[in-house]
Image (spheres, grey):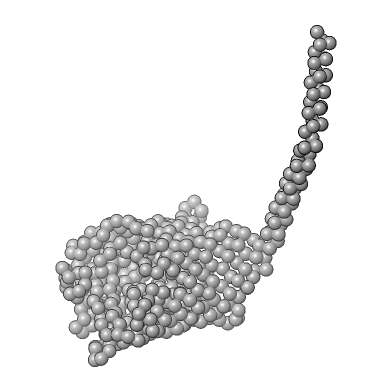
Amino acid sequence: MLTAILRTARRVSLTLASATLLITPAFAEELLDDADTMQRANQNSKEAEANLGALADVSANYKGLVIRTRDDEFTFAFGGRLQFDAAVFIQDETKLGNGSEVRRGRIKSYGTVWTNWDYKIEVNFDPDLDVPITDGWFRYSGYKTFTVTLGHQKVPFGQSSMSSSNWQVFQERALPDAFSNNEEQGRRRLGLVLASHGDVWSYAGGVFSGGLGDSGAEDEDFGVAHRIVLAPIAEKTKVVAVGGSAAYRYFDAPSVLRFSAQPEAHLAGAKLVDTGKLRASRSVFMYNFEATVVAGRFHGQAEYTATHIRGRMGQRNLTLSGFYVQAGVFLTGESRNYDQKSGKYKRVMPKREALGAWELAARFSQIDLTDRTLLGGVQRDLTVGLNWWVNPNVMFRFNYVYGNTAPNSNIPDSALKQTAGQDEHIHAFTGRAQVVF
């Protein structure tokens, strides 16, 4: 029996050996080629990783995704923001819109090429905007004393307008922002800006054409704007800064200006004060005064803005104005991050990772759209805000706004025709969830 088993095993072994001899010549070369290919691929991968590590650093942190060459000649960064708002209103006259919205949804790319050329492109997915590009510019920073920026960018005017909505104290800017953020004036315009700064001062000024969405005769409009800020104290937790801005815009063709303001809650929709259409306007001159104070956990800010409108062909000249004052405190001990080089607020950095930074603030603002026979109305808002900065990227806002018009607009072609010329009171409860990356 054992002899039979051994004989069978010998036959199987001989058969397998014969098969191996037959197969090996057919596949040996292919197997060797595959092994060589895999070895070369692994080697190339290791070399690529080594070259990338030698040439560039890649990081992903609270500032976004950043790729930087070791020689600092090239950088590329990617980021964005999402702001989700909700609001509930109590009103006695004009119906305001309860609801929710994506207040801002933006994606941006920015960086440097060849050491001295900076760029930024930011697209806004807000459906209310005709032009989705908010920022689109490039800058030469090779000079030691100043920079030159060309493209679609913010017009240098006032601290509130220049500061990012990401880091502002309240959910919305104050009422006087209506003077700089409207269709005819515009917070952003195509232009050329020169900026410089010293140990205690900063300056930005430029010339501007229309916005990206302008068309027709008004394309030949032009404007100039300047802003200078003096900050004799500009330390990490102590700031005293005062500044002034001036902006002039000339309309080549008869322009139709209109200034209006809604309560400091974007979802309100309706404008409670409104000049109506100011036809045959030749030019607009605006000036602004600003003051900022930071003392440890406490901070304060105030601005005054006046707007002078010059009419054509005997049309009367008008003067409109507005102001706000505000103060706040970090309950958890942080300080407002004020950038002396640009004269505006920057990112809040919580001290405690688990608790975050808690900020309480209050603001009073007013806008006056009346002058002689123009009765656009006067509006006053009182806003109280609570901010929870969870970390450098995530925050939640809670605002209460009390608004009063005395009276509201009495312009026949305004949306407020049914309540024209009446005193009005509104209460708004608003909230925002925000992530910046």
In the image, residue 230 above or below residue 165: below
In the image, residue 30 above or below residue 335: above
Q: Which residue is situated farthest in the top direction here? A: 1
Front-most of 227 and 99?
Answer: 99
Residue drawn at x 16%, y 68% as measured from the top left? 419
Query: Residue 57: which quarter of the image?
Result: bottom right
Q: Is residue 359 shown to the viewer in this render?
A: no
Query: Is 167 displayed left or right of 94 in the figure?
Result: right
Q: Quadrant of the N terminus?
A: top right
Front-most of 91 and 8?
Answer: 8
Q: Is residue 353 shown to the viewer in this render?
A: yes
Q: Position of residue 271 (x, y in %)?
A: 25, 69
Query: Is 1 displayed left or right of 182 in the figure?
Result: right
Q: Position of residue 154 (x, y in %)?
A: 44, 75
Residue drawn at x 31%, y 64% as measured from the top left? 265
Q: Which residue is situated farthest in the bottom direction here? A: 314
